């Protein structure tokens, strides 16, 4: 059977099945494109082929001697994951490649897709873990090399927020569009505020993201509750939190909810809370999935004074911004919540949900990827056979 659709490779060194941004890309393009995926985990639905990266391989298994010697090209080429992915993809031909994050772009460049490459950068790569000196000294210069050498070769680039886009252009001369991390528009009701008011947080479980919120709950003087839906990435932290709050009257810890069920689950609560202390550039200017999950769930939003998140909350009048990132400030804001102000915030989220959704955001991917597919077609090289189904 022939397939006349343009051949699109979506490449990412991430767990595709639980990466909301990747799943949106796959769902978006799998109808009009013959989509091949390459990443960790099993094949997502809707693809014509999948190449699974072994879970023991990562993009950070770098040769330290090569990093010290600043032999960055060799460091990349000798990575086990680089060799594995290049071997899996081999001489595969694609019309367009959508390469996610800096580490994937060199492989995309090497495959020489007919129409070109679109790079989607989920973080500001060179400052992702800048709070650690080893990252600043060894990894950041390596990533800067990859950006200057390969990301600049991409035909188009997007990232997750306006400040990151500005910084990529100022530092590296890479112009970026912006695609916010918004989920698909959900048709959900605006629930009545509970008594007591119900806070909720969902996502990865790390001390940097949870400790401030938990410390704040120890200071809260009202009956407000906090429910946590935590993704356990290992290390024992989730179990520590669970044991600490067994039987607690106002803090409950739950298992993580599948991505496609999360927004509906959150809809049962009143205010989504996310406090992200600015320990790095990426934390300071974060625009995470959960912020938009809260909006689609028709919740009020409570966040710290992170510039991008706070600006969004204020622009749409969907919630509350603390004065700083201390537990005391967070507790003060929680104590100030009333059913009336929370109900108003929930209603404003209902209005904002019509705009802060994937349906409005994905044009930032659709336009450049379709342009590259058209470029491939004009070159007369769009193949009509589906890719090899093995992987």
Image (tube, helix red, strand yellow):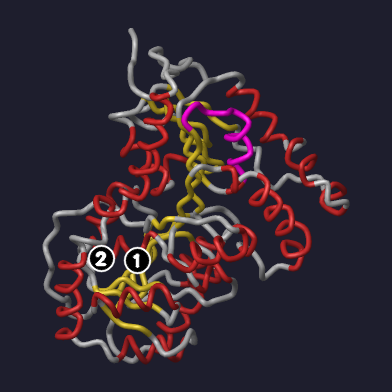
- The residue positioned 31% from the left and 90% from the top of the image is 335
Image coords of residue 172 (percent x, y):
62, 59
The stretch in magenta equals: 103-115
Residue at position x 32%, y 86% in the image: 334
**Which secondary structure is most common in the magenta stretch?**
helix
Residue at 44%, 23% (x, y): give it: 379
- Going by the image, does 218 lie left or right of 186? right
Secondary structure state at the residue bearing disc 1: helix
- What residue is shown with label 1? 291
In the image: residue 20, left or right of residue 358: right
Q: Is residue 111 magenta?
A: yes
Residue furthest to the top in view is 1
Q: Nearer the viewer, residue 163 or 90?
A: 163
Disc 1/disc 2 C-alpha distance (Å): 7 Å
Residue 277 drawn above or below residue 163:
below
Residue 172 visible here? yes
Q: Position of residue 158 (x, y in %)?
A: 45, 52
Magenta span has 313? no
Asked if the residue under mark 2 is in contact with the one under mark 1, i.e. CB atoms within 8 Å, the reply is: yes
Residue 352 location (% of width, % of height)? 20, 67
**What label does residue 295 carry, if any?**
2
In the rendered image, is residue 42 in sight?
no
Which quadrant of the structure image shows residue 294? bottom left
């Amino acid at each position: 059977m022939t397939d006349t659709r343009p051949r699109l490779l979506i490449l990412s060194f991430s767990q595709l099945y639980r990466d909301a941004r990747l799943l949106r890309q796959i769902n978006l393009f799998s109808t009009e494109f013959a989509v091949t995926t390459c990443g960790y985990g099993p094949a997502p639905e809707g693809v014509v082929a999948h190449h699974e990266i072994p879970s023991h391989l990562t993009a950070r298994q770098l040769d330290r001697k090569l990093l010290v010697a600043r032999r960055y090209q060799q460091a990349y080429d000798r990575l086990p994951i680089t060799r594995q992915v290049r071997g899996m993809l081999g001489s595969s031909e694609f019309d367009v490649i959508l390469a996610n994050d800096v580490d994937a772009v060199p492989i995309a460049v090497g495959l020489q897709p007919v129409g070109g490459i679109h790079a989607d950068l989920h973080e500001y790569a060179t400052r992702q873990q800048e709070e650690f000196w080893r990252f600043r000294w060894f990894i950041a210069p390596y990533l800067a090399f990859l950006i200057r050498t390969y990301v600049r070769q991409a035909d188009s680039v997007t990232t997750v927020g306006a400040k990151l886009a500005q910084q990529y252009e100022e530092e590296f001369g890479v112009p970026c569009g912006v695609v916010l991390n918004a989920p698909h528009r959900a048709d959900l009701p605006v629930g009545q505020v509970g008594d007591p008011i119900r806070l909720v947080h969902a996502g990865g479980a790390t001390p940097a993201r949870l400790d401030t919120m938990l410390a704040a709950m120890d200071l809260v003087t009202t009956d407000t509750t906090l429910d946590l839906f935590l993704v356990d990435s290992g290390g024992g932290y989730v179990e520590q939190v669970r044991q600490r709050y067994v039987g607690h009257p106002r803090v409950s810890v739950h298992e993580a909810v599948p991505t496609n069920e999360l927004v509906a689950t959150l809809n049962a609560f009143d205010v989504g809370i996310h406090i992200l202390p600015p320990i790095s550039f990426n934390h300071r200017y974060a625009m995470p999935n959960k912020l938009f999950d809260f909006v689609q769930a028709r919740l009020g939003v409570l966040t710290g004074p992170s510039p991008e998140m706070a600006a969004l909350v204020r622009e749409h009048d969907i919630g509350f911004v603390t004065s700083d990132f201390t537990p005391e400030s967070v507790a003060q804001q929680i104590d100030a919540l009333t059913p009336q102000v929370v109900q108003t915030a929930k209603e404003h989220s209902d209005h904002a949900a019509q705009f802060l959704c994937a349906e409005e955001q994905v044009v930032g991917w659709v336009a450049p990827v379709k342009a590259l597919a058209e470029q491939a077609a004009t070159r007369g090289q769009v193949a009509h056979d589906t890719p090899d189904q093995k992987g």
